[in-house]
Amino acid sequence: MGERITRIGLMGGTFDPIHNGHLVLAEQVRTRFQMDKILFIPSGNPPHKELVASKEHRLKMTQLAIEDNPYFELSTIELDQDHKTYTIDTVRRLRKEYGDNTQVYFITGADAIIDLPTWKDVHELVQLCSFIGSTRPGVNEKELSEQIDALVRDFKADITITQVPALAISSTDIRRRVKYNLSIKYLLPAKTEAYIYEHELYKDSRKVL
Ligand code: NAP
């Protein structure tokens, strides 16, 4: 009998901060695709982005948010690097680590996946993993599915789009709420919320949005 195929989900994002929308998405995808685990991979220095909270804070907030789910794990594979990090390098390394009997799914926001043609070594990347893109309520689904269909056709990528109502929560909105002293209770795990206040994150008025 052949060895059992393991399925892992790589949950990539800035997580600035992580919130319940991310957690609900990860749990729904895990059960729907019968994944063995979900690795949360906070981006190190994303190629095109200015971050608000430091690597250390984003790492700690993610750790606190996922620690009570035995299927969730934190990976510092991108945070540990000082240079720019690309998904292809992360997926290559993890595929090597987990071996050929592992099926890999990269999970992130659908609008990030729309830009796939600009990602480094996209032709190899689509061979190495499937993609799960999540959308928020209110997104124009017709336009999105046309864009995804074109990607599937042009790159032979395996992409599934899933709408997660809990993703009405967004990191941008949480940062804005903290800045204006509005409540963020129930939008993210209580331990992560407490960490934000303890370290006075997102108070800096210039950089929040
Ligand atoms: P982002 O700008 O932080 O997010 C774009 C949108 O997607 C936002 O609406 C965001 O909502 C949502 N989002 C981000 N991560 C998500 C997740 N895991 N689940 C659900 N929604 C998510 O995107 P990013 O962090 O730069 O990029 C996302 C992932 O794609 C990262 O792992 C990044 O490394 C990878 N990526 C790779 C390349 C490349 O290799 N060249 C290029 C672009 C992106 P919230 O703000 O609420 O999270």
Image (cartoon, helix red, strand yellow):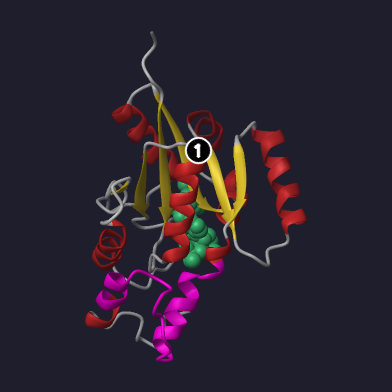
What is the secondary structure assignment of the residue under circle 1?
Answer: loop
Residue that mark 1 sits on: 33
Q: Residue at x 35, y 55 (%)?
A: 42
**Magenta stretch holds residue 178:** yes
Name the spot of residue 206 as percent of width and height, x first: 42, 86
Q: Is residue 48 visible?
A: no
Q: Residue at x 27, y 71 (%)?
A: 191
Q: Residue at x 58, y 46 (%)?
A: 116
How many marks are shown on the rendered structure?
1
The residue nearer to you, when weighing 148 against 167, is 167
- Against 2, residue 199 (above or below) is below
The residue nearer to you, when weighing 117 against 63, is 63
**Magenta stretch holds residue 169:** yes
Name the spot of residue 55 as percent of width and height, x first: 28, 63
Left or right of 72, for residue 145? right
Residue 181 sits in quarter:
bottom left
The residue nearer to you, when weighing 180 against 189, is 189
Q: Residue at x 39, y 79 (%)?
A: 185
Outermost residue to the top: 1
Graded by Cα atoms within 10 Å as few (under 14), some (14 to 19) or many (20 or more), the crowding at tag 1 reads: few
Give the amino acid at mark 1: Phe
Looking at the rendering, the stretch of residues picked out in magenta corresponds to: 168-195
Residue 6 sits in quarter:
top left
Residue 195 sits in quarter:
bottom left
Left or right of 149, for residue 128? left
Left or right of 75, for residue 127? right
Quadrant containing the N terminus is top left
Name the spot of residue 177 as percent of width and height, x first: 45, 84
